[in-house]
Image (cartoon, rainbow, N blue to C red):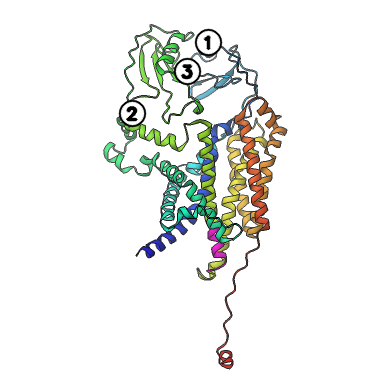
Amino acid sequence: MKAHFRQSMAWLHTWCGLVCGWLLCAIFLTGTLSVFRDEITRWMEAEPVVVAHASSTGPAAAEQVAMGTAYLAAQAADARFWRIELPKREGAPLNVFWRIGTTNQQAALDPQTGQVADIPAARKTTGGGHFVKFHYSLQADVPGFYVVGVLSAGMLIALISGVVIHKKIFIDFFTFRWGKGQRSWLDAHNATAVLTLPFLFMIVYTGLAIFYTSYVPMPMETVYGNDGKAFSRFEADVASHAPAHGIAPLGALSLRDLSRPLAVAETVLGRPIGRVLIDRPASADPKVRFFGAKTDTGDSPRLLNAEGSITFSAAKGAVTAFDASDPMPFSIHDIHRATEYLHRVAFGGAVMQWLYFLSGLAGTAMMITGSLLFSTKRRLKHDHAFGAATPYLYRAIESLNVALIAGSAIASIAYFYGNRLIPADVIGRAPMEIRVFFWVWLATLVHAVVRPPQRAWVEQAAAGAMLCACLPLLNAITTGQHLGVYVAAGDWARAGVEITSLGFAMLLAAIAYRAARAPVAVKRKAPAVRPASAQAASS
């Protein structure tokens, strides 16, 4: 019974892993890259490099807010709203936003003077957001969202069945037979699986759990209905309730001087202010909302780290809404928040980001080795497993392996090339960058179909290595920025992007080298059957 059950699990693990594994390789790779989504976005925006000075100080937050409101009052007094975003780092501008009618507008101000900043505008780009959206929806909106959900459930099945069929899974972790073909792929698959098993279970489960009301909507609809406000009622029931603030009204507020409510907001929220939103500034009673600054994950070991907000009535100076920052009384809603933050590594700083990044790469390697193990095993046997269609099916599997593994890596680096090669002033350039990603990925599929599998692996891995290695050079040619400039300025976010690109170049070059040296697989010949007459004569 046990042997039969394990055998049935082996079939489930093989085919579930293969069918789901192709797209999951790309989903996991883009998810791994999205760990550094903010750093990627900053590199792709190509803003001027500013040398950091530890001792330099700028105007206080209240002065910068006053500069922003003065500019907005002069330029957009009748706007629907004003939004002021304080500089997040040294050298960054003071950004102001407003809406007139249905048109959103913005300007970048010098935080020292309040005048329009004389700096080149950042490139319009989706940046790291592309990898995030592909990771959870394949850039295919609602249908892609559900496809990713099904694939994630399939991965959970593959993980569980993989544990069941490996009786000596932890012993196999310490076994690696180099240069042994199929056995080497099996050992690599086992090692990367055991190494990342807790991470893989956590990351796949949390990825499904944070969208639980979408994937399993019936419980919520049963209790709250299925009308447009059902989700709002559900969130209101599970939301954290902020403690009473006990703040006395400050009296009428001037939008030109918000220093008093700003000081109160910083005290109550327990952190600096990051942005200010003023709703209907031309009305008799504008609402002024202060948001706490998002704490750098490097400074926050806490998993729950909401910035909070507080809203004042400008007419009376009274607090009309208060959303406390963490830590605050625990609620059911915080379970969902913790699950979400755990999935997207919104805590722990650079150390935790790199742990997620390396674990994500190892998890991707586990899927890759599993897919290649399937091809290696069936290349040497099962010549008629699917009748006359067998060779065509296995050839298609090998082509898909190349395109969906090596091809997704090439498409990802091509996305960065699109960012630098598409002119900065072209309208609609952000969608163009995403189209570059998909067109290049399609090209790798065509290449994998028309080339022999082994040559396709060598050529695509070599192409990926060359593209990764040349990315810093392309950046220097198109923007005048390069790794040396970033390091000298202490801009390790953008320097890290180029250093990681060089690391991928070495990895892909090693893969191309190994693939080029690998012996060409030759199918086993079936033993010849001697005619009956010959057998009789010999006897």
Label 3 secondary element = strand
Q: Residue at x 51, y 30 (%)?
A: 349
> On the image, numbered disc 2 is attached to which residue?
330
> On the image, numbered disc 1 is attached to which residue?
63
Would you place residue 75 above or below residue 382 in this image? above
Q: Earlier in the sequence, mark 2 or mark 1?
A: 1
Label 2 secondary element = loop
Q: Residue at x 47, y 27 (%)?
A: 300
Which quadrant would the N terminus be assigned to in this image? bottom left
Q: Residues within 10 Å of mark 3 (few under 14, many from 20)?
A: many
Disc 3/disc 1 C-alpha distance (Å): 12 Å
Amino acid found under the numbered disc labelled 2: Phe
Residue range corresponding to the magenta coloring: 372-381
Which quadrant would the C terminus be assigned to in this image? bottom right
- Residue 53 rendering spot, x and y as whole percentages: 62, 18
Q: Residue furthest right?
A: 477
Disc number lying in front (2 or 1): 2
Amino acid found under the numbered disc labelled 1: Glu
The numbered mark at residue 273 is 3
The quarter of the displayed image where residue 438 is located: top right
